[in-house]
Image (cartoon, helix red, strand yellow):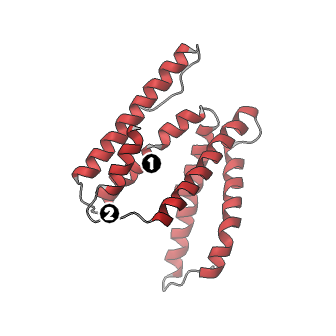
Amino acid sequence: MGALAGLVVLVLGGEGATVDPQGVLLALLSAAGYSAMTLLTRWWGRDGGTDSSGTTVGAFAVTSLVLLPFAAVEGLVPHTDAPGTLLILLLYVASVPTALAYGLYFAGAAVVRSATVSVIMLLEPVSAAVLAVALLGERLTTATLAGTLLMLGSVAGLAVGEARGARTRGEEPDAVPA
């Protein structure tokens, strides 16, 4: 509950924040897809069905097919005055924050419990807020700070609960960052 409260404060706490119902629906759809992918990755990893690179390639193939009609409507080739720079940026985005990051995510999701992965993923909006303040010059507001602290507190509380639950069941607790 604290994580949800922190997310709401983090997202809506800024000046002039508005909520678009269509955006909320799309976010819920995205969350459902992400949850399904987390569960599938854990299942595949547990049963040895595929490795993290296979999961990454499969996920991006499905995503590409789903997004292809929208890209065709908008134009498959971006219009720019600097095609070389665009190509370098596209290669960077495709390789580092996409393929590498998701490959690492799927590798981790295959070996830890799905609940633990979900807890760790709560750090994503916190990371976005920190990067927005540090790199994009957004102001650090009381709401941003409060939302970030709520999210971090919730992640820490859930991680402690996960570790205690694992010890109670006689399992080795998953490695959760401090």
Query: Residue 106, located in which quarter of the rendered image?
Result: top right
Q: What residue sits 77% from the left and 39% below the top?
A: 49
Q: Name the kind of residue labelled 2 in the image.
A: Ala
Q: Examine the rendered structure and indicate whether residue 24 appears above or below residue 34.
A: below
Q: Position of residue 15 (x, y in %)?
A: 25, 62
Q: What residue sits 49% from the left and 43% below the top?
A: 121
Q: Examine the rendered structure and indicate whether residue 114 appears above or below residue 89.
A: above
Q: Name the kind of residue labelled 1 in the image.
A: Glu
Q: Secondary structure at mark 1?
A: helix
Query: Residue 19, located in which quarter of the rendered image?
Result: bottom left
Q: Is residue 78 left or right of residue 64?
A: left
Q: Is residue 160 left or right of residue 29?
A: left
User: In the rendered view of the protein, which quadrant contains the C terminus?
Assistant: top left
User: In the rendered view of the protein, which quadrant contains the N terminus?
Assistant: top left
Q: Is residue 34 left or right of residue 148?
A: right
Label 1 – label 2 distance at C-alpha:
20 Å
Answer whether labels 1 and 2 touch (C-beta < 8 Å): no
Q: Position of residue 66 (x, y in %)?
A: 68, 65
Residue 17 image label = 2
Q: Which residue is mark 1?
A: 124
Q: Is residue 126 left or right of residue 53?
A: left
Residue 20 image label = none
Q: Is residue 75 visible?
A: no
Q: Examine the rendered structure and indicate whether residue 85 appears above or below residue 140.
A: below
Q: Position of residue 76 (x, y in %)?
A: 63, 79
Q: How many marks?
A: 2
